[in-house]
Amino acid sequence: MRFTICALLAISITSCFPARPLEKTTTTPPARIQKISPAVSTPPPPPSSPANPPRMTVREISGITFEGVAFDSRNHHLVVADQPNGPGTLYPDSATAARVLGGTAAVNAGFFTPEGAPLGLVVSAGKISGTWNTTSSLGSGVWYENTSSSMAITRREKLGRASGSTMRELIQAGPLLVENGRPISALEATKSSARTLILWDGGTRWWVGHGSSCTLAELGQVLVASQPADWSVHHALNLDGGRSADLWISDKIPGGPLLRRPPWNRPVRNFLVLVPR
C-alpha cells in the first residue's frame, strides 16, 4: 500500500512538469572551397590595322591646297630641330634640318620673337628653350611627345607648365584649329595667309604639312568638314606660317620629293622633322 501511494505521488509530480522537448540538431555542410586563379595580365588588343608607311598627300578642298605627309606614330614620329643661337644658325631650311637629323620630311614649327627667341616653350630631346606662353593665342595649343613615346595635341591649360617641362619633345604654338572633332570658335576670319599645321586623328594617325592661303576660320571649318589625310581630324594645331612656311619631303616617301619654300621665306627658329622609330 505504501508503494502504491509513493508511485501515484511520483506520477502526479511528473505530470506537472512536462518533458522538455528534444532540441533539433542542425548539421551545417562544410563551405565550398573555391579555387581562385592568380590574376593574369591581359595584353591590350592588337591595333585594328597595321601601321602604314609615310606617304605624301595633296588635296584641294574648298579652294585650299593641302600638301604634306601622313604617317603612323607606331613606326614614325616627329622631333624638334631647335637652334639655340637663333634662326638659321644650324639649319637654313627644312631640307637641311631633315638631312642632319636623318629625317624624310620636315616643316617649320613654332613662332619666335624678332630677336629669334621662341614665343613659347620648346623642348628638343629633353632640352628646354623659351618660356611657357600663358597669354598669346600663338601659344594656346601644344604638340608634344612624352617619355613613353606617345604624341598628342592639347590645350596649354590641360597640359600645364610643369608637365610641359617634362616632355621629350614639345612645341607650343597656336591657335588650336580643331578640338575633339569640332572647329574652334572665334578664329580670325579676315587675314589670309599660307598655313603650316599638324593634324591628329586622336589615335596613331598624323599629318603634317602646309595649306595654301586662307583664314584661320576657313581652315578650321574645312578641316572638320573634310579629310585632307583620308581620316577625320580630331585635333589640329596651327604652326607658324606666312613667310616662315617651309615644307620639304624626300623622294624616299611615296609621292615625293616636294619642296615648298617661297623665295621670300625667312629663316626660322625651329623645325619638326619626321624620323623613323
Image (cartoon, rainbow, N blue to C red):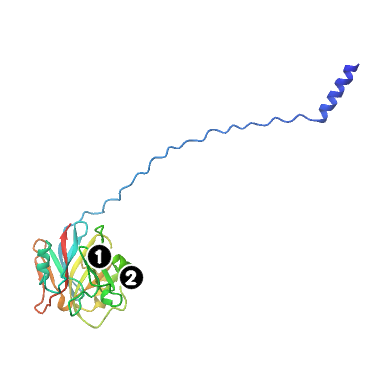
Residue 22 against residue 222 in the figure, above or below? above
Would you call the spot at circle 1 few (<14 residues within 10 Å), some (14-19), or many (20 or more)? many
Q: Position of residue 143 (x, y in %)?
A: 25, 67
Q: For marks 2 and 1, give the CA distance.
A: 14 Å
For residue 189, side relative to residue 212 (left or right): right
Residue carrying label 2: 157
User: Could you say whether the residue bearing mark 2 is in a helix, strand or loop?
Assistant: helix
Q: Position of residue 162 (x, y in %)?
A: 31, 66
- Residue 25 seen in this snapshot: yes
* Quadrant assignment for the C terminus: bottom left
Would you call the spot at circle 2 few (<14 residues within 10 Å), some (14-19), or many (20 or more)? few
Between residue 124 and residue 261, name the one nearer to us: 124
Between residue 161 and residue 11, name the one nearer to us: 161
For residue 251, side relative to residue 173 (left or right): left
Instruction: Write the residue at 24% across / 77% down.
Output: 216
Q: Earlier in the sequence, mark 2 or mark 1?
A: 1
What is the residue that sits farthest to the right in this orientation? 1
User: Could you say whether the residue bearing mark 1 is in a helix, strand or loop?
Assistant: strand
Three-letter amino acid code at disc 2?
Glu
Quadrant of the rendered image containing residue 158: bottom left
Residue carrying label 1: 144
Three-letter amino acid code at disc 1?
Tyr
Residue 114 against residue 162 in the figure, above or below? below
* Quadrant assignment for the N terminus: top right
Residue 123 against residue 12 in the figure, above or below? below
Instruction: Write the residue at 42% across / 39% down.
Output: 36
